[in-house]
């Protein structure tokens, strides 16, 4: 936990992590009253160069953490870009087998710390290439923070043809995806984005 605190404060000196309950899951997230004033240029550059995505609960993962555990279990689920770990934790609490994947070592640590806080555990890997078992569903929550990731969807479908996409930046389903509706969830802590990024588009690609 100390390493995560230091990682946040290395970017935003006045920031801290606090236990925050999101639905049934307890996470260590940036405090809701985190500094909002314009940042010193060096601080802003540090945040921009390496944003601590894992210190927030983003809308797609937050909403899926409450909806997906109520659906039929499809086998092993991979949570790609697991961040804070909220979705993986919610699925483990529901008894699912889940593997978290995130290229950011701090996110992997955050997922592990948050998992322990909820009394569960699951593997958290750095890449899909490390997975050696059959996967029933690959979940992409808030995956489109970088629009370039859209181009990688077909490659991901070769890893697992069953993809579930939940993202507040998506307005139309990508080719090959079936829309499953729109839902609402506000980022935690709230970034004062208004309602623009609270509408989540859910879509699925089946084998």
Image (cartoon, rainbow, N blue to C red):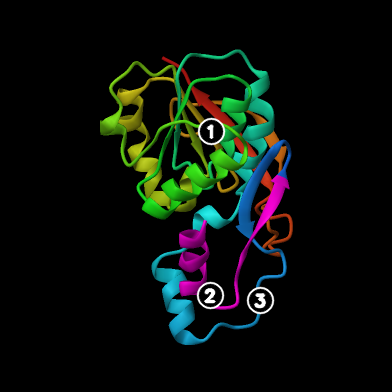
Name the N-terminal-most of marks 3 and 1. 3
User: Which quadrant is the C terminus positioned in?
Assistant: top left
Q: How crowded is mark 2: few (under 14 residues within 10 Å), some or many (20 or more)?
A: some
The magenta region covers: 1-21
> Can see residue 172?
no
Left or right, residue 105 beside residue 192: left
Numbered tag placed on residue 80 in the rendering = none
Quadrant housing residue 38:
bottom right
Residue indicated by mark 3: 36
Q: Residues within 10 Å of mark 1 (few under 14, many from 20)?
A: many
Numbered tag placed on residue 12 in the rendering = 2
Left or right, residue 201 beside residue 165: right
Q: What element carries label 1?
A: helix
Q: Where is residue 131 in the image (x, y as percent from the top left)?
A: 30, 27
Residue indicated by mark 1: 88
Pick the front one: 101 or 1: 1
Q: How crowded is mark 3: few (under 14 residues within 10 Å), some or many (20 or more)?
A: few
Name the N-terminal-most of marks 2 and 1. 2
> Can see residue 49?
yes
């Amino acid at each position: 936990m100390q390493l995560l605190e230091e990682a946040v404060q290395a970017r935003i000196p006045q920031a801290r992590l606090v236990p925050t309950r999101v639905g049934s899951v307890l996470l260590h997230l940036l405090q809701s009253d985190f500094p909002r004033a314009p940042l010193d240029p060096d601080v802003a550059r540090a945040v921009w160069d390496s944003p601590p995505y894992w210190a927030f609960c983003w809308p797609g993962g937050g909403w899926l953490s409450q909806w997906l555990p109520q659906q039929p279990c499809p086998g092993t689920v991979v949570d790609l870009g697991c961040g804070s770990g909220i979705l993986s934790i919610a699925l483990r609490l529901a008894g699912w087998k889940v593997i978290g994947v995130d290229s950011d070592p701090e996110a992997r640590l955050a997922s592990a710390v948050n998992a322990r806080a909820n009394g569960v555990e699951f593997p958290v890997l750095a890449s899909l290439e490390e997975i050696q078992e059959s996967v029933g569903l690959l979940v992409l929550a808030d995956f489109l923070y970088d629009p370039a990731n859209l181009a990688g969807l077909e490659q991901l479908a070769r890893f697992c043809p069953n993809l579930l996409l939940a993202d507040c930046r998506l307005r139309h389903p990508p080719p090959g995806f079936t829309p499953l509706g729109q839902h609402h969830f506000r980022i935690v802590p709230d970034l004062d984005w208004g309602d623009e990024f609270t509408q989540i588009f859910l879509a699925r690609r089946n084998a």
